[in-house]
Image: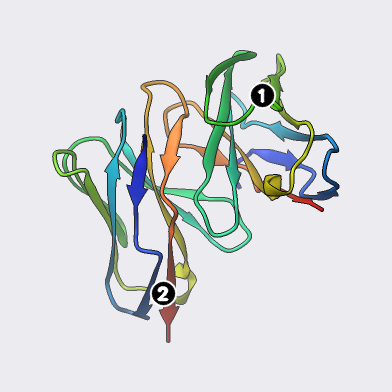
Amino acid sequence: ETGVTQSPTHLIKTRGQQVTLRCSSQSGHNTVSWYQQALGQGPQFIFQYYREEENGRGNFPPRFSGLQFPNYSSELNVNALELDDSALYLCASSVTGELFFGEGSRLTVL
Amino acid sequence: GQNIDQPTEMTATEGAIVQINCTYQTSGFNGLFWYQQHAGEAPTFLSYNVLDGLEEKGRFSSFLSRSKGYSYLLLKELQMKDSASYLCAVGLENYGQNFVFGPGTRLSVLP
């Protein structure tokens, strides 16, 4: 148990739709990052939020966006879903460097 | 660009020792991390090296050579529950969480 919770755990969408994934970080962790993990691959950094501001972004298009709230929980929004967006989306929080991951949200795009 | 290489798969026998290698070429370096990920689960932190040398943590040890861009994870006294993917990751920033992950090494421990 890392104290990081994500919802929903599984969801299915169709191409072109929009999705919102949610994350509650571990208590006291003010930095949250999101990763995309395709099947059989390592996680890919999407972006990071620190005190409600985006504070770093990986090589993902603008249709991937996010929010962080005053309680440090976070959302990942993906617009205009594509088939290649099918993946496990991991939220991670940290205060000293090591990442504490949630269980992930598995998104399937049909 | 960022590049991290690991073997795709390894197999070992219960009770044995296995070494999982990782080589990296990244634009920055703020530590080398190893994570374990069981199928269908989230990655969990195993070890961290920021200076050259060996870090030991129970049955797990991790080694780093920054000049060679090389690390390994050593697992001793293998147990069946060690069957998992092992992810090598490099932290790129001093305070952020921008990590570059390798593809992972899927370890199968056989009886």
Task: Locate residue A69, reporting x and y percent.
Answer: 72, 17
Q: Which residue is mark 2?
A: B79
Picture quadrant of residue B15? bottom left
Picture quadrant of residue A5? top right
Residue B102 sits above or below residue B50 on the image: below
Foreground mark, 2 or 1, reads 1
Q: Amino acid at mark 1?
A: Pro
The N terminus of chain B: image quadrant: top left
Residue B98 sits above or below residue B111 on the image: above
Name the residue: 29% across, 44% down: B24
Cα–Cα span, label 2 and label 1: 44 Å
Q: Chain of mark 1?
A: A
Who is closer to the viewer here, A39 or A62? A62
Give me the disc on residue A62: 1
Q: Residues within 10 Å of mark 1 (few under 14, many from 20)?
A: few
Residue B81 sits above or below residue B15 on the image: above
Name the residue: 44% across, 35% down: B99
* Residue at disc 2, secondary structure: loop
Residue A95 sits above or below residue B87 on the image: above
